[in-house]
Amino acid sequence: MPATPPTRPACLPSHRPPGRSLVTRVVIVGSGPAGLAAYRAILRACGRAVRSGELHLSVISDTPDFRAPGLNADVLAGHLPAEANRTPLRRLLPRATVLVGRVTQADLTMQRLQVSRADHDPYWVGFDHLILSEARPDFRTGPLAAHLEARQAARLTVLDSDGTGVELALAACERQRRHAPARAPLSVTLLCSGELPGGRPGGPSPVRAALAAAGVTAHELTRAVHTASDGVRDQYGRLHPSDLTVTADAAPPVLPGTDSLPRDGQGFLLTDATLRVPDPANVWAVRTAAQGDHAGRNVARALRRREARPVPDGQWTARSVRLGHWNAVTHLHAPPPLTGAGHLHLILRGRLGWLARTLLLGAALPRPAERLRVALALLRPAPPARPDTPAAPRTTDQPTPV
């Protein structure tokens, strides 16, 4: 009787440089929704190999917590505590080695990354597959809130490119109205190098109406070329006075060693239809959770020596813009492959848009407890504004009696 052939392992080691361990190593750089989705996709496809130690997953993050995108404006406005938008990564990634640090050098030829950590000297981490989560840097609302509370900024300028700064500008105005209604109004200027969401520049839209009602001066198709301590100068030579300038959508950071890789006009890596970077071997780049899930499944297919699949056409997209508490504009788009006919555009405004935004933000959170906590906070009525402490009245100077 012929011998039974050996069982094919779940994930076979791919090509690696000489001298590398037989354990297959997948490294994910970035702990946002895209990186988390890639981890979960690999774990679903290769869970047995991960548990047996045949496949090792590592996640490199500059923060020990997961922060969901889209909630920064709610935190800044004071409707959501900052702790509600933080989940420890080690709780979400139990089967991965979480390295809290930053990549200081990428050697794509030798397939290794140099990692610098606060509690450790720089060291090299090898990889067989590398997934780069290219999310824009998460805007930290804490420093801006501290400036507003300390009354150190009377003129705020927000730099934006795709409408993300709309939420930040409106949330800053909302925070001051709630916490300091008796104070002089905050002067906010929004410089958007692209078009504001909601139609043509200058045309009627709920976004422009909300900005005008809040007193925000918005300039569309205006790019900042120079930032100084006293203001921002745009491409037309105009100076916008400012005490504090913040960038709502900074370009994704470029890892040292990947400078020569092709990128688009916004600084993101160019990939083929499978989300693989064409030049180096086994490097993938993702931006969204859907792309992270697809790249993770393609990595699992590559480990099984199968051909990677392109991103399928016909995925629906959603985008929501927060205009205030219980006020949002949510755009839903379904392409022809999903509708069976033409493109389907659905725009929800006001409270209905806010409910849709709450559902979308809840779906982006990794755990049911966080989804429930955030949903309850977002669906609460807005608390009344607290009165500001009035300043003591000034008296005229009196001569000192002799």
Image (tube, rainbow, N blue to C red):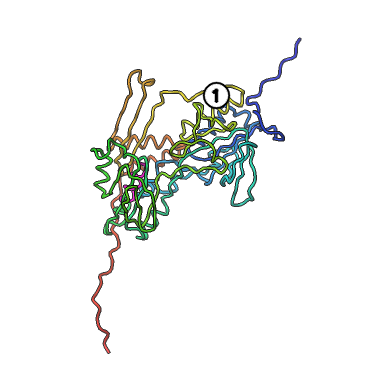
Q: Residue 16, percent across and down?
A: 66, 32
Q: Residue 351, percent across and down?
A: 28, 37
Secondary structure character of the magenta stretch overall: helix
In magenta segment, residue 107: no
* Residue at horizontal 24 percent and vertical 38 percent from the top: 203
Which residue, as the protein is rendered here, is positioned at the far bottom?
A: 402
Which residue, as the protein is rendered here, is positioned at the far top?
A: 1
Residue beneath label 1, please? 308
Image quadrant in which the N terminus is located: top right
Q: Amino acid at mark 1?
A: Ala
| Location of residue 49 with respect to 397 vertically, above or below | above
User: From the viewer's perspective, is 353 left or right of 312?
Assistant: left
Q: Nearer the viewer, residue 167 or 374?
A: 167
Q: Nearer the viewer, residue 306 or 54?
A: 306
User: From the viewer's perspective, is 22 left or right of 83?
Assistant: right
In magenta segment, residue 169: yes
For mark 1, give the secondary structure: loop
Q: Tell me where residue 152 sits by quadrant.
A: bottom left
Tell me the magenta residue range.
Answer: 163-173
User: From the viewer's perspective, is 31 left or right of 179?
Assistant: right
Q: Nearer the viewer, residue 331 or 54?
A: 331
Q: Residue 341, percent across and down?
A: 33, 18
